[in-house]
Image (cartoon, helix red, strand yellow):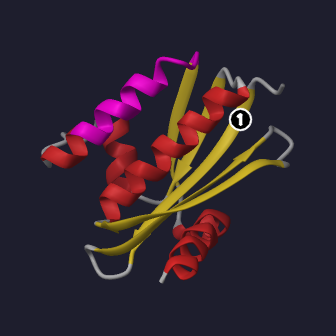
Amino acid sequence: MNEKLIINTDGGARGNPGPAGIGATIKDEQGKIVKALKKYIGEATNNVAEYKALIMALESAKEIGAKKLHINMDSELIVRQMQGKYKIKEPTLKILAGEVFKLLHNFETADFHHIPRELNKEADKLVNEAIDEKI
């Protein structure tokens, strides 16, 4: 298995909060999709959905046996929180961030990158499919 994986995650809610979905792509270093994930998570806020998408992707990367992760997200808030640049004040997000930090212990390295929404189309498409299939 490729030791380094590139993860793109996205989460979204129609209305905020509203019906929410999460999506992620996991690619090898050549850019080939190893796994595409999507799930409807019920009523949630955008930020909760973003965190849940990240958790889903990390659990999947752990199952695959990845050692190093390059994580792309279009949520500047979550990326900055993961980098320690922003404090996590919202109680629900604190709990979800705690889950993320616990999962990150399974990897040698995990670096977070904020990317523009246009570069996150595949994950965004999975989010919308998850919501559309449910509502």
The residue at the point 67 percent across, 66 percent down is: 122
Residue 16's x, y, as percent? 27, 75
* 106 to 56, vertically: above or below: above
Residue 89's x, y, as percent? 13, 44
* 75 to 107, vertically: above or below: below
Q: Is residue 120 left or right of residue 90?
A: right
The residue at the point 61 percent across, 63 percent down is: 123
Stretch of the chain drawn in magenta: 95-108
Q: In this view, does 76 lie to the left or right of 23?
A: left
Q: Is residue 82 left or right of residue 131?
A: left
* 73 to 16, vertically: above or below: above
**Which quadrant is home to the N terminus?**
top right
| Outermost residue, front side | 134
The residue at the point 42 percent across, 50 percent down is: 52
Residue 23's x, y, as percent? 57, 60
Q: In this view, does 11 lie to the left or right of 26?
A: left
Where residue 91 sits, quadrant-wise, is top left
Residue on which disc 1 sits:
5
Q: What is the secondary structure assignment of the residue under circle 1?
A: strand
Residue 100 falls inside the magenta stretch: yes
- Out of 85 and 11, give the one closest to the viewer: 11
Q: What residue type is labelled 1?
A: Leu
Residue 47's x, y, as percent? 31, 59
- Out of 23 and 118, give the one closest to the viewer: 23
The residue at the point 20 percent across, 47 percent down is: 92
Magenta stretch: helix, strand or loop mostly: helix
